[in-house]
């Protein structure tokens, strides 16, 4: 009888652990979607809330930005996304680290100059217990 009780608790623990992991993954997906919306319609306060103070934001051109310059670029139109579509998305959560990958296809208007981009993106997010914060992002060129 004791073995059955222990086995039942073991199964409940696995189920609850899987549920928590699943909820964390859903919150990560939502964070990526929220950031994508903010890149099209930037809001300084929300961008600061969603990004880690030690943010390392890498562009496919090799340009690197910290939290302040990333937000400033969006607010001033240096980086101006008109549309963004995320394709081939994948997400993984390991403890308090979230890994998001996708192909970003966007229409841009950087500094008033229309453009089109198709790049690969790797994002590293950190869960602080309350929300996911973008810690690092690196874009890379992919064959057209």
Image (cartoon, rainbow, N blue to C red):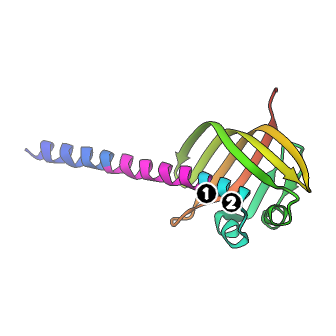
Secondary structure beneath dot 2 equals helix
Which x, y percent locates residue 125?
63, 54
Which x, y percent locates residue 16?
32, 51
Q: Residues within 10 Å of mark 2 (few under 14, many from 20)?
A: some
Q: Residues within 10 Å of mark 1 (few under 14, many from 20)?
A: some
Looking at the rendered structure, which numbered label has been put on residue 90?
Answer: none
Q: Nearer the viewer, residue 51 or 110?
A: 110
Residue 105: name its quadrant: top right
Task: Look at the image and say whether residue 43 sits in the magenta stretch.
Answer: no
Residue 79 higher or lower than 60, as above or below: below
Which x, y percent locates residue 41?
71, 61
- The N terminus: image quadrant: top left
Residue 101 higher or lower than 67, as above or below: above
- The C terminus: image quadrant: top right
Circle 1/circle 2 CB separation < 8 Å: yes
Q: Which residues are magenta?
A: 16-32
Q: Residue furthest top?
A: 143
Residue 115: name its quadrant: top right
Looking at the rendered structure, which numbered label has been put on residue 34?
Answer: 1
Magenta stretch: dominant secondary structure: helix
Tell me the distance, in whole angstroms, between the alpha carbons under discs 1 and 2: 6 Å
Residue under numbered circle 2: 38
- Horizontal side of residue 113 vs 59, given as left or right: right
Which x, y percent locates residue 5?
14, 47
- Horizontal side of residue 136 vs 59, given as left or right: left
Secondary structure beneath dot 1 equals helix
Q: Nearer the viewer, residue 66 or 4?
A: 66
Task: Look at the image and say whether residue 22 sits in the magenta stretch.
Answer: yes
Q: Residue furthest bottom?
A: 45
Picture residue at 88% right of the left edge, 47% below the top: 114
Q: Nearer the viewer, residue 71 or 116?
A: 116
């Amino acid at each position: 009888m004791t073995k059955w009780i222990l086995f039942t608790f073991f199964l409940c623990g696995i189920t609850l652990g899987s549920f928590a992991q699943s909820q964390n993954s859903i919150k990560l997906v939502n964070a990526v979607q929220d950031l994508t919306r903010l890149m099209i319609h930037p809001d300084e306060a929300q961008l600061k809330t969603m990004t880690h103070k030690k943010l390392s934001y890498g562009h496919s051109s090799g340009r690197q930005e910290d939290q302040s310059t990333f937000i400033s670029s969006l607010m001033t139109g240096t980086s101006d996304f008109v549309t963004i579509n995320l394709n081939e998305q994948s997400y993984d959560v390991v403890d308090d680290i979230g890994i998001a990958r996708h192909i970003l296809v966007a229409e841009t208007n950087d500094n008033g100059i229309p453009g089109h981009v198709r790049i690969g993106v790797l994002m590293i997010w950190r869960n602080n217990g309350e929300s996911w914060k973008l810690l690092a992002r690196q874009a890379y060129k992919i064959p057209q």
